[in-house]
Structures are given as structure tokens and as C-alpha cells.
Amino acid sequence: MHLVFVYGTLRQGEANHHYLEESPLLGSWVTPPEYALHDLGPYPGLSAGHQSIHGEVYQVDDSTLAKLDILEDVPVEYRRESLDTPYGLAWIYIYQDVSRLTAVIESGDWCQRI
């Protein structure tokens, strides 16, 4: 089993949450101020920065993690890094093409971007 921290379209009520329907939600969590959340239109991109990011931590199996990697186009568009959460070490998806990251979501919360 793996833990994954999701901060965008995989969160509850968002377009890609169906990927996690069978995975237990361990809880909501806000990261330390070590990231920046950017609006790429239909989905967000995460990079290093000084924002705290709102998201959810899920427990996923190997098959679900593989599907998430395909969705996130790992290792081309995103890469996976590990992140300490109150639930244990979790994967987080980091956007790779920083030249496209211009529109910052000031709240650090994809669900509150508008």
C-alpha cells in the first residue's frame, strides 16, 4: 500500500476523483509552506515555493498508484516525490515544466481557485 497526497482534480468533488473512489481517505491536510500552486486551466501544477497547499491523503494500492502515474504522465509532465504527512510518508506529484507555471493560486487551495 501507498499513501498519496492529492491537491487538485483528484480531490473530492473534482473531475478526476473517480480514480480514488475505492481508496480510503485518511484525512485532509495542509502542507508546510514549501510549495507553490499554479493554475494551468483544467488542472493545477505544483512546484517548490513558499505556500502551504490544501489537499487530501489517500491510501492506494499498486494498481491505483499506477493509474495515477498514467494520469499525471509520470515522469514526463509530473514526477513523484515523497512528503511527510501526519498519516505517514506520502507521494506528491510535482509539475516539471516550470516555464508554464505563471498563474499562482494564492490560497494554495485548488478547490477555492475562483
Image: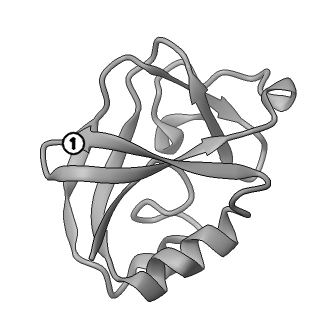
The residue positioned farthest toward the left in the image shown: 86
Q: Position of residue 82 (x, y in %)?
A: 39, 45
Instruction: Say which residue appears at 28% left-offset and 56% top-offset.
Output: 57
Task: Check disc 1 and report the residue beneath it.
Answer: 85
Question: Which type of secondary structure does the marked residue at label 1 adopt?
Answer: strand
Which one is in front, 90 or 71? 90
Query: What residue is rendered at 56% in x and 59% in y?
Result: 9
The relative height of residue 63 versus residue 43 in the rendered view (above or below) is: below
Dot 1 crowding, Cα within 10 Å, few <14, some 14–19, many 20+:
some
18 versus 29 height, above or below? below
Residue 4 in the image: state x and y as whole percent: 37, 59
**How is this picture coloured?**
one colour
Q: Quadrant of the N terminus?
A: bottom left
Q: Amino acid at mark 1?
A: Thr
- Whole-percent x, y for residue 11 in the image: 43, 59
Horizontal relation, residue 60 to residue 94: left or right = left
* Left or right side of 35 for 96: right
Residue displayed at 71% across by 57% down: 75
Choose between 68 and 44: the one closer to the eye: 68
Where in the figure is residue 8, as x and y percent of width and height? 53, 51
Q: Which quadrant of the rendered structure holds the C terminus?
A: top right
Q: Residue at x 77, y 40 (%)?
A: 40
Residue 2 sits in quarter: bottom left
Asked if residue 64 is positioned above or below residue 104 in the image, the reply reads below
- Of residue 106 and residue 26, the one placed in the foreground of this image is 26
